[in-house]
Amino acid sequence: MTVAAKLVVGNWKMNTSVYQAEELCLAIRERTKEVDKSKVTIVICPPFISILLVKDILKESGISIGSQNTFIDTSGAFTGEVSASMLSDICDFVIIGHSERRRIFLETDDLINKKMQAAFNVGLKPILCVGETLQERDSHSSESVIQRQLETALDGIADISSVIVAYEPIWAIGTGKPATPQIINDVVSSIIRPVLNDNSNKAISEKNPILYGGSVTPENVGDFLNGCDIQGVLVGGASINPIQFSHIVQLTAE
Ligand code: PGA
C-alpha cells in the first residue's frame, strides 16, 4: 500500500471490549467517509483481539490497520505473544518502541531493534516511537537519548524506506500538555532527520514520514500540522473518541 503525504495513527492502547471496538470503528468509518484517503492515510491500532473484526468492518473504507506491538520470533513456544508474520496477514503497520512498552514492559533499545527487524522481514511498516522523559529534557540529554533510541532501532535495517518515526516526548503523553511546535521542530531537524539521513541516502530519508504524538486533540492538531516539519500525528486518548478522532483526520486532510 502507498502511504499518503499525511498520516493520522490512532493508538487505542488497552481500551475497548470487542463490542466497543465494533461500535467505535463503525463510528469512525461513518465520520471519515468523505475524507479523501489519498491525502491522509488513516491507521487504526486496536487491541489484538479486535484486529480481525475491525479489519473486516473497515475493508472498503480505505482505513488501514496497525498492531500496537509484535514479538521478535516467527512462531514457537512464546506464550501470550503474537509474531510479525502472523500480523502481516492482517495489518500493514505496527507500532514499535512505544514509551509504555519501554517503561512498563522494560523493552530495551536492543529488543526494539529486533522487533524492527521482525517487522522489516515480513513487510510490516514500523511506526517507531522515540522520546525523552521530562528529567532527560531538563538535564539537556534529550538529544543523546533520542539519537540512541533511533540509531539502535535502525541498526542493521538495510532499507529504511518503510520506517515511520513518531516523536513522542513521554512528558506529553496523556498529560494534556503537548510539546510546543518549536520543541518538535528542534527534535526533527537536529536529531531525527539527521539520523535518518545517516542511515540511508537522502533521497529516501527525506521521505520517511515523521509524526508527533502526545496529547494531540482537534484543538491543537493545526498547530503541529501548520507549525512543524511533520507529516502527521499519533493519537492516543482522542483516538477512542470517534468525534475527536474523525475531526483530527478531517483537519489533517485539509
Ligand atoms: P495521548 O497518547 O494522545 O493520549 O497523549 C499518545 C500515545 O501514547 O501515542
Image (tube, rainbow, N blue to C red):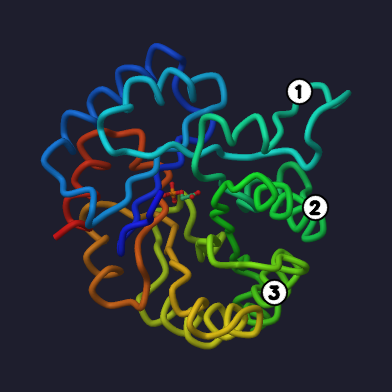
The tag earlier along the polypeptide, 1 or 2, is: 1
Q: Secondary structure at mark 2?
A: helix
| Location of mark 1 (residue) | 80
Label 1 CA crowd tier, 10 Å (few <14, some 14–19, many 20+): few
Label 2 CA crowd tier, 10 Å (few <14, some 14–19, many 20+): some
In the image, residue 189 lies at what x, y percent? 48, 86
Q: Is residue 228 left or right of residue 132?
A: left
Q: Is residue 162 left or right of residue 222?
A: right
Amino acid bearing label 2: Leu
Up the image or down, 90 lies above or below 203; here it is above
| Location of mark 3 (residue) | 145
Residue 181 vs residue 189, the one in the foreground: 189
Q: Is residue 144 left or right of residue 13?
A: right
- Observer-side mark, 2 or 3, equals 2
Q: Which mark is residue 182?
A: none
| Location of mark 2 (residue) | 111
In the image, residue 148 lies at what x, y percent? 73, 74
Amino acid bearing label 3: Val
Residue 61 vs residue 195, the one in the foreground: 61
Q: Is residue 54 visible?
A: yes
Q: Is residue 200 left or right of residue 53?
A: right
- Observer-side mark, 1 or 3, equals 1
Amino acid bearing label 1: Gly
Residue 102 vs residue 52, the one in the foreground: 52
Which image quadrant is residue 4 in? bottom left
- Mark-to-mark CA distance, 2 and 3: 16 Å
Q: Is residue 168 visible?
A: no
